[in-house]
Image: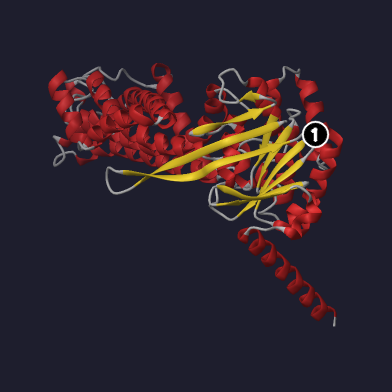
Amino acid sequence: MLLEVKNVYKSYKKPFGIIKKESVEILKGVSLSLKEGECLGIIGESGSGKSTLGRLIIGVEKGDCGSILIDGIDISKKNRKVEKEKVSVVFQDYGSSANPRLKIIDIISEPIKVFEKLSKKETINRIIDLLEKVGLSKEYLYRYPHQLSGGQLQRVCIARAIATNPKFIILDEAISSLDVSIQVQVLDLLIQLKKELDISYVFITHDLTAVTYICDRVVFFKEGNIVEEVNCMNKLKNVKSQYAKALLHAAMTMDSREEIYEVQRIS
Amino acid sequence: MIKKLMRDKIALITLIIILSTMLIGIFAEEIAPNDPNKTSITQKYAQRSQEFPLGTDHLGRCILSRLIYGIRPTIFLSMFTMLCTIILGTIVGVTAGYTRGIVDEAIMRIVDVMLSFPSQVMILAVVGMMGVGIRNVIIASIAIKWAWYARMIRSSVIKYNDRNYILYSKAIGASKGFIITRHMLPNILSEVIVLATLDMGWVILSISTLSFLGLGVQAPTAEWGAMLSEAKNVITSHPKQMLAPGFAILILVSSFNMLGDSLRDVLDPKEV
């Protein structure tokens, strides 16, 4: 197992009155696993705790109890630089994913500097290589993030994420703030990278169509719990839980509506 | 960045004014036409002449020379004060913002205490306690100002701490020092520099004010505020005496303020 999440709980303290603090449970005993070369979709509504789970996996925050294992090693252990190298992340908000004061070359060179000791020339070659992998030419090297479009910037973020040769990447709503046409391009890029570099994805989203496009397995997330797990995408229609059904139904009616619009536009 | 600064005319002019003033201050010995402290009772309140380009004061000292020598305490002491304030404020602010928890609470309560005093009164109190002199004025100014900077820097640190690029750095396990020097400080310092240039005017005025009151720079050292203070005694009979130091302070302080305004635009990376 590449990634194992076992019975993880997480709660935040929210101010309640002046002194009292109320604790709000975000994750209530979540367990899931990710095999190598697999793409796991985590789907759920806003506030269901899916992004919190992502933050726990990348180690920015710590869970209250339960354990997260990467390659069988608990990430809460101290000496975990090796584990850090195995996981990477791409965020939803590409605008704040890159430091606006740094050039693209500096943004991508950051993980290379942290993990590898390369000479300047090697680093630049490496970065050009990475940019080519995500479909950007080397003319972008010396631009600033605000000079790039959203899709291009998200590609830069993906390039940065694969710079460390990670085993798996957390995609936290990575395509949600892009245009639909760009979304497809980025998804295609992700699928291609998965084949080339043999990476796994944890794809956190609220968009069911994107999940069907890229994922091998889906878990439905609601109020900090996994309500249903679908292991084969063809069986997606056979979901049992109320929430998954509702979600699927909503997506399907939207699709059919789109078809109607399409017909109207053509006629 | 320098290119952007060059394109901004106001920034360029103010920068030239400030830099040339500093240069004149550094080379005061070579430039000043007369000894600033040489008195001559027969020459007092002299009109403009070849020997005294701006006339003389009530002791017959060359006003231009005093103005030039006065640059040193005025600008360099203010810059020194600002620098110390920023360094102290940054260290305290980053510590508080980055550690959070009890350390943060403790530091912020101290800051609250410092902020609750009116600044000029506090400076007067410190000077009253520690004695008259420019050194104590500077210590008092730093003691008053650092709290403002600490509070501002702390809130920026907290703001940037949630940015995705810092989350990413944390996720890949970059060290705290790396994150602070590479991501935090460039963002924070550009905000601080703007505030610092605006505050520079305040510090110059503050040192001049205290010298005017006779608490800062002591006679016979030339300082613009002290010169104003001396000129004030003869304001009815020789009002022109106020002009030279008054205009010098006005131009320098407004240069710093306008430079601060322009820097805000120049340092914003999104501004093309």
User: Is B36 on the left-hand or right-hand side of B120?
Assistant: right
Secondary structure at numbered mark 1: helix
Q: Nearer the viewer, residue B176 or A231?
A: A231
The quarter in which the C terminus of chain A is drawn is bottom right
Outermost residue, front side: A240
Q: Quadrant of residue B114?
A: top left
Q: Residue at x 57, y 28 (%)?
A: B182
Label total for image:
1
The quarter in which the N terminus of chain A is drawn is top right
User: Is A144 on the left-hand or right-hand side of B141?
Assistant: right
User: Is A254 on the left-hand or right-hand side of A184?
Assistant: left
Rendered view: A233 above or below B34: below
Q: Is residue B96 visible?
A: yes
Q: Which residue is mark 1?
A: A130
User: Is A28 on the left-hand or right-hand side of B169?
Assistant: left
Q: Is residue B50 visible?
A: no
Give x and y (percent) for residue B123: 20, 29
Q: Residue at x 18, y 23 (%)?
A: B42
Q: Nearer the viewer, residue A58 or B242?
A: A58
Outermost residue, bottom side: A267
| Amino acid type, label 1 | Leu
Q: Residue at x 27, y 26 (%)?
A: B143
Q: Chain of mark 1?
A: A
Q: Residue at x 53, y 24 (%)?
A: B176
Question: Callout 1 environment at 10 Å: few (<14), some (14 to 19), or many (20+)?
Answer: many
Give x and y (percent) for residue B29: 39, 16
Give x and y (percent) for residue A238: 74, 59
Q: Nearer the viewer, residue B145 or A104?
A: A104
Give x and y (percent) for residue A111: 68, 27
Q: Quadrant of residue B120?
A: top left
Q: Nearer the viewer, residue A163 or A4?
A: A4
